[in-house]
Amino acid sequence: MDLGLRDQVVFVAGSSRGIGKGIASVFLEEGARVVLTGRDTTALSSACAELSNGRADRVMTFHGDLVEVATIQEAYRQVRMQWGDVHTLVCNIGSGTAANGWQITASDWDAAFAMNLWASIRLVEVFLPEMIEARHGNIIFISSITGLESLGAPLQYGAAKAALEHYSKDLSRRVARDGIRVNTVAPGNILFPGGSWQRKLDVDSAATLSMIAAEVPMGRFGRPEDIGAAVAFLASDRASFITGACIVADGGQTRA
């Protein structure tokens, strides 16, 4: 489907692998120009080599830790210098790797919120002013179904994602009349090499597949490209009347 995204500039945070890479891939298929970012130079180079095949003029990379404000500012400067206005900002920063249980140290809380909430907010604070000035733009947060329901994830991770989803909804109301749409995609169990579900399969495939069969009505894992398709749709004019939404992509796992 042609979503009308050709030549639009899309910044995908955390796109050297997994969900972020799947999002970048779908935007490139739609003809967009995509900024790939990541902290691992090897993974970033590999993703660039794979995704830029035959379309190197539509891919640029930025290496750095986007938890840091100065790094975000430098990434924004480089994109503006090369391609101008950013049409879509995809905030795909987060990690569910954290201590479980209820006795959580202050440093564990701080680390979870820094990665799963503050980094996305800082991205917005750097990119949003120019979007408002241009009176167009899309901001799309990648959250998690653990921010919507109690699913046994670490407390600090679920709390940070719930806060992100609330922030997205509230922000959407504040910038709608500036021509900016703000939405969230909440993935369920997405399988990709090196991801948390691949690691669980490697440890105990029978138990993991049994859980998926019991908890996910569609009976399978999602793919990064499934999330990419939802994000690309939200970024397009086909979704021009959608803002403040949280699109759940979980094969029917959530119940509320």
Image: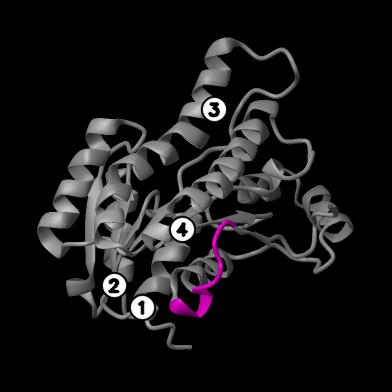
Classify 10 Å Cα crowding around label 1: few (below 14), some (14-19), many (20 and above): many
Q: CA distance from mark 1 to mark 2?
A: 6 Å
The answer to which quarter of the image holds residue 87 is bottom left
Q: Which residue is mark 2?
A: 8
Q: What is the x, y in percent for residue 89?
A: 37, 56
Is there CB contact under 8 Å for labels 1 and 2? yes
Residue 236 point in image, percent of width and height: 44, 75
Three-letter residue code for mark 1: Leu
Q: Which residues are magenta?
A: 237-244
Query: Which residue is rendered at x = 75% and y = 51% of the image?
Result: 205
Horizontal and vertical percent position of residue 223: 59, 65
Q: What distance separates the C-alpha of mark 4 from that of mark 2? A: 20 Å
Q: Which mark is residue 176?
A: 4
| Element type at mark 4 | helix
Question: Disc 4 or disc 3, which is closer to the eye?
Answer: 4
Q: Which residue is mark 1?
A: 5
Q: Secondary structure at mark 1?
A: loop
